[in-house]
Amino acid sequence: MKALNDQQFTRYSRQIMLQDIGEVGQRALLETKILIIGCGGLGTAASMYLCGAGIGQLVLADGDDVDVSNLHRQVAYREPDLGSNKASALAHQLNGINPDTRTRTVNKMLDSDRLAMEVSMADLVLDCSDNMATRQAVNLACISEHTPLISGAAIGWQGQHMLFDFRRPSPCYRCLFGQQEDLPGGNCQTGGIAGPVVGIIGNMQALAAIKLILMDSPQPAEFHQFCGNTLSMTRLAISPDPSCPACSPYHAKEAHHADSPQ
């Protein structure tokens, strides 16, 4: 790992003071590449704190443009950004936060081939998208590439985020949510959203990402549910679905490999 320079020691001094981070941990953050899929409320919140923390590269993927209805919760954007591609506008803001964090943008929705390629090049994926089809596709790509996934969602006063560490056999997003399509009223456009809820979930995704980078061992799959009305958080372990069409073939392949003579 490359040694920190004097300016970096000063910039990250409050993080380096933490026993769980230190200089070694900060260098690990600076060498990590994270793919963020979706630059809405979740993606803007998560990316700003990951950039501030000194993540080495953030790849930002979103094909949408900034709309005035986004501004109450997607706080990285400004009035002059209206009509601009979200990934490009977000990269512009991040470049002004921390020069240590390199940004690259994908200014379109990721099709299956491009998604697989981007996931394969990332150390970690944050799914900050707003629809079930994308979440299920990202889940499959991360399983295939053995890439850890932190998925988030929010609607109304409720938010949730999930960790799936696919560096080892793990339950997956489809084990938890079997459906392939969104339920009626299941997005912010039709169901509404309290702005700070997406900020909380996006920041929780960023914090989970930082913790995962600093941990040497694979992490258990967990589901975290936040209620904005009661300000409460519930945490549950995620159990694998033996018949899950997404991850059960992967589990069977790993088991066969483990049982094969060496």
Image (cartoon, rainbow, N blue to C red):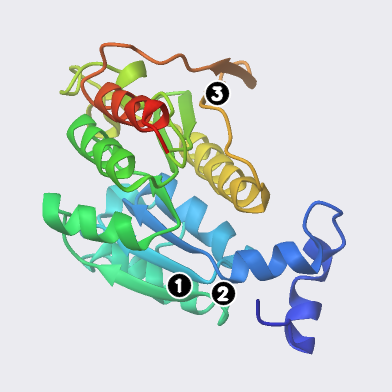
> Where is mark 2, residue-wise?
97
Across and down, in percent, residue 175 comes to 33, 18
Would residue 42 be found to the left or right of residue 51 on screen? left
> Which kind of residue does numbered mark 3 sit on?
Phe
Tell me the residue at 45%/57% (across/down): 123
N-term mark: 1 or 3: 1
Across and down, in percent, residue 219 comes to 58, 34
Would residue 239 be found to the left or right of residue 23 on screen? left
Q: Which element is circle 3 on?
A: strand
As displayed, is residue 36 above or below residue 218?
below
Q: Residues within 10 Å of mark 1 (few under 14, many from 20)?
A: some
Would residue 16 be found to the left or right of residue 240 on screen? right
Please indicate, yes or no, whether residue 231 appears anywhere in the rendered image: yes
> Where is mark 1, residue-wise?
93
Q: Which mark is residue 226?
A: 3
Task: Confirm or deny contact between disc 2 and disc 1 (CB under 8 A).
Answer: yes
N-term mark: 3 or 2: 2
Measure the C-alpha gap from mark 2 to mark 1: 7 Å
